[in-house]
Image: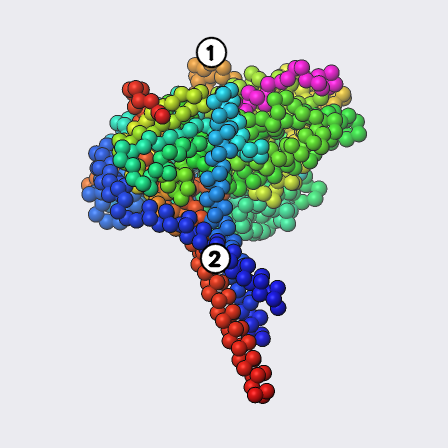
Amino acid sequence: MRWQRAQLWWLVGWLLLGGTLLGKGLYMQAKAHFAQYLIEQAWTKTLADGQSHKPWSWADTYPVAKLSFQQNSQVSHFDRMASNDSLYVLAGASGRNLAFGPGLVLSSAGAGDSGNTVIAGHRDTHFSILKGMTVGRRLSLQTASGKDILYQVVATEVVHESQTEFMAPSRDDRLTLITCYPFDALQGGAELRFVVQAIPVTQTLFTLN
Amino acid sequence: MTTGKRVKEVSEAVATLVIAVAICWCLPFVVLASPNSPGTLLESGNMMSMQEGRSLLQPSLFDYQDVTQGILVYHNPNGALVPSLPLDTQVSMRVSGLNNRVSVKQIFHNNSEFVLNGQYLFPLPNEAAVDSLRLHIGQRIIEGQIHPRAEAKQRFEQAKAEGKRASLVSQERPNMFTTEVANLAPGEQLVVEISYQEAIQYEDGLFRLRFPLVVAPRYIPGNTADNGGDNDRVTSAQVFDAERIVAPIRGADGDNSPELKADIWVDLGEGVETSMVESPYHRIKLNEERGATTVSLANSVPANRDFVLQWRLKQGNSPLAWVFNQRGKTHQNESDVLSQGAGNAIEDSYSLVMVLPPKADNHSQMRLPRELILVIDTSGSMAGDPIVQAKNALLYALNGLTAKDSFNIIEFNSQMSQLSSGSLPATSSNLARARQFVNRLQADGGTEMALALNAALATNHQDVTQAAPHLRQVIFMTDGSVGNEQALFDLIRYQIGDSRLFTVGIGSAPNSHFMQRAAELGRGTFTYIGKVEEVDEKISALLNKIQYPVLTDIQVHFDDGNIPDYWPSPIPDLYQGEPVLVSLKRGQREPKALVITGRQGHKNWQQSLSLMDNLAAIPDQNAGLDLLWARKQIAALELSKNGTNDDRVKQQVTALSLNYHLVSAYTSLVAVDLTPIESNAMGRDAVVRQHLPLGWQPLGILPQTAMASRLDMLLGAISLFIAMLLAASMLKQRRLERASMLALKTKPQV
């Protein structure tokens, strides 16, 4: 009978542990996914009146830009879901903000300003899209004034986390996207970063759909 | 029994469902993570080409091919390779009365096989009068000479070119200096000894000295640094010498650059209450011998935070007034010697005078309502412990408000944001809102201090409290890690109006020069908070102290009505517990009695004292008083700069510094050996890499963008799976048991 009681405790223990871990993981993913809808609403308001709007009342950040990835010419079926997505970029790349969306590093140039605009995002949620990023692909960044800036990827690199020169201000205009590397690692706390550098495309004939 | 079974079935079903969902969630990631997706191959190719590109851009200062034996090398921000130079610091201080004579020995070692030319950016206390440089080569000592900055630099460069050992000490900021050494032969050790004079801080019977051990990295506004171009330099439109005030930093863990160690000895002299000697941030050893107390660090410490020592004198010894005198100058120059030789020695006397005004009667002071503007620095340099200290300090200051007061909170990093556009009355709902605001603050971004100062000092004239007299107090909490101090001082000077500015230095290595000058210009005081435990005590003391200045409008004159040559001038207002501290120069024919007057609330206060009788019998008290006097005058001259008189100030400061042998913004000390070194090794430039101040987040880390959500989900799914297996085995077991029980029951009946 005691043996059965012990078994029951074990069962409850495993269930609780599994439930919490799974719930935590799911919660992080869900938060990342659904926060973007709320942020989208704030962004629409920002575009309308040019002011900063918090996506929810207790938020300490606000969307500063909308980042869209242009579809590849040959769309693989796994990309389809992701490439339709536009990501809303939040002000500040703190851990808390990154849970809700990619963050604009505040010490870098603002979206649409001249200089190096640095945006960081989580590799297992929003910026998992960077995995297929290749030189030549185009990105579009919508600023708070409603202007669309078209960028073309000029380099992708895997670097160590100490190589902050990628975040340093630059004289030319560029967009730097940073996420952790490798993409398929399961645990957190990575030392390597995947850096995508893009420069503005001067001919603005291209229109985003 | 049946309900239990039900529950089990339901929970099993739920578990299965959850696991199914988890597997569905993970599946796309697992497929995406397969190694043959198109990105991976190209990435490595790109990496190679970029690396090649970068190595081509590197200036060929130093090459890995040069390295044939162990030498520490690092990439400077420009990508060039510069060897790292090990260094030890030995500080010995002699305190006598309010005077502190300090010798700082910087010991440079060359463990490489090259002849090294080293550079070290280091901090000193903000009021230090640096007057002496000695270069120790083995047993020989070479005295440093004072020269105008450009000339000293030229002498140093010439010695460097001629293969002679030399060292140069120049000032970058009043609390930031650079030592350069030339021709450090392989295996050799050079000792650069720098001496300075400073006055000890005395307040409420407590003596305090502060020795900074690290230059906190400064924020440079208007930075236009570029990487990858040919011109790899830190430049800024607002800070002209940005490149000189950025110290190379040791990397985070895993970096094997030599640790910078410091040793400190302090001779406190006699009459010290040994139980009251305290160093809040370091462990110290006390030693008492024949009444004299000496203090030293328990063991050498990494140079990563300010050393603070505070003590009290034995009961009854605490002075109410102190006068120290000295005849003649510490450093005689040629004209002094000539006039002495001619017999017409008209030596000037120098005095340091300290008077503690009587305590103000608390009841006579009406408590005026105050408008408290709390400004908090939330820049990236405040990340970690400092922001916690600052937030606690803010919350504590909010608690001190009463219903009559009004307040506002301003937060700044790259941008500035305020709690509200104007000051709010201190109602409980407003305070609750403020606490929420404070709790949400986090440290990130730049340090655009001008924005916050503008907002904090701009008075709102249509304010509701305009009719009633009230105190407008700005409490400014920051680590002061900025490079554009002068511009900020100008801003404070022109905008201060009726406000008073109180600076609170946060963190392990605040910029004390900025803190003190800003508070002086803002007619307030400065406070340091070095750890979270100090917040309550220090902030409550500050809020009490700044109720009202105790003594204003302070004047000094001789008893015959003449005004002596004294500094600082004008004397800043005093708050509770602070003494009047004046340095003055007196000709031989001038009177020997001094009168200090001031206003204490509605009453006049006056004290006369003789310059002749020393109120304390302290040996060696008379050294370096002229240096303090000259140093204070230089500070006053620097502050009087307004854009139109810059050239004149420069001339005056240069003349004064040359006369008194002081290092200033325009003069440097240089020591050159006569004989060249005997080594054929190749010459290399090296730098001393300093520690990051304690509690600072290591710079140079790209944002952390990895979460363990997938790992969590996987582990969760696995544990649920195990639970399911367990449940299944339990059920099976129970079924077997029941079957056997049934079998047992039925058997006898048959």
Chain letter of the residue carrying label 1: B
Towards the viewer: B581 or A15 = A15
Label 2 amino acid?
Thr
Dot label at residue B644: 1
Question: Is residue B466 covered in magenta?
Answer: yes
Horizontal arrangement in the rendering, residue B164 relative to residue B632 (left or right) = left
Horizontal arrangement in the rendering, residue A171 relative to residue B678 (left or right) = right
Secondary element type, mark 2: helix
Q: Can you say which quadrant of the picture contains the C terminus of chain B?
A: bottom right
Horizontal arrangement in the rendering, residue A77 relative to residue B385 (left or right) = left
Instruction: Name above or below for residue B643 compared with residue B625.
Output: above
Which residues are the magenta region?
B448-469
Dot label at residue B292: none
Question: How many marks are shown on the rendered structure?
Answer: 2
Residue B275 x, y percent position in the rendering:
64, 49
On whether disc 1 and disc 2 are found on a single subunit, the reply is yes
Task: Judge depth for marks 1 and 2 and give the one in front.
Answer: 2
Residue at position x 56%, y 72% from top? A4
Question: Is residue B73 covered in magenta?
Answer: no
Labels 1 & 2 near each other (Cβ < 8 A): no
Secondary element type, mark 1: loop
Towards the viewer: B145 or B515 = B515
Residue topped by disc 2:
B16
Chain letter of the residue carrying label 2: B
- Labels 1 and 2: the sequence-earlier one: 2
Label 1 amino acid?
Thr
Q: CA distance from mark 1 to mark 2?
A: 81 Å
Residue at position x 35%, y 32% from top? A69
